[in-house]
Amino acid sequence: MRDSKKQERQEKILLEALRLFTEKGYFNTSVSDIQAALNLSVGTLYNYFKNKEAIAITLFSNIENCLYEALCEIERKHLDTAGRCKAIVHHLFDTTERAPASMQYLFYTKHREFMAVEKSVFASLPFLKMKEMVIQGQQRGEIRDIDADVALVALFAGPMRMISLRIDNILERPLPTYLDESWECAWRSVKAV
């Protein structure tokens, strides 16, 4: 019971930090802001996290791990590269609708400015998994023989831009309504003839 309460409080801290980081920005959010929003003492917050950077790193790691697990599941469910990559775009679009702050934090926060130990999100496990799927698609002749990074960008940069447009409230419709058009454009750019 005690562990579940501790985990629940830690989750509340992370969710509040995520909200504040995406609304105010990392540098404009203090530990005191997080603690005050949750009505916790500073000492209680420090029982869970050493500092604000530890909160930021934990958030990044949790979001990254969830995305990586989703990609592994997509890889198991879909055998062909087109099916896998379309499922990835669908997952990213759906996650943006359900958890826009998580997607904003993952893709659009400049993590290296305040998390010196973290590499770019584009060198993280989920993106390496996506690149691996692209390379497998090339090896099977489903994706034409171009640089794997160029193929990766061709497949996913457009959909990621759609995500940023949605987060910025430029797109009025939910992202899944754009899935087929967005995917068709992306896939046509790389599919083998």
Image (cartoon, rainbow, N blue to C red):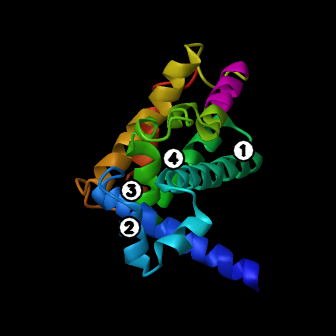
Relative to 112, residue 23 above or below: below
Q: Is residue 80 left or right of residue 103?
A: right
The numbered dot on residue 75 is 1
The picture places residue 11, in percent across and down from the top left corner, at 58, 71
> Which residue is identified by label 4?
89
Q: Which mark is residue 175?
A: 3
Q: Position of residue 181 (x, y in %)?
A: 39, 45
Quadrant in which the N terminus is drawn? bottom right
Q: Which residues are magenta?
A: 131-139
Q: Any magenta on residue 150?
A: no
Q: Please give the label number shown on residue 32.
A: 2
Magenta segment, prevailing SS (helix, strand or loop): helix
The Cα–Cα distance between marks 2 and 1, rounded to whole angstroms, is: 42 Å
- Mark nearer the N terminus (4 vs 1): 1
Residue 134: image quadrant is: top right
Q: Nearer the viewer, residue 23 or 157?
A: 23
- For marks 4 and 2, the one nearer the N-term is 2
Of badges 4 and 2, nearer the viewer stands 2
User: Does 138 lie within the magenta span?
Assistant: yes
Residue type, label 1: Glu
N-term-proximal mark, 1 vs 3: 1
108 displayed left or right of 102: left
Q: Taking 34 as reference, is 87 above or below it?
A: above
Point out the tag, 4 or 3, that comes first from the N-terminus.
4
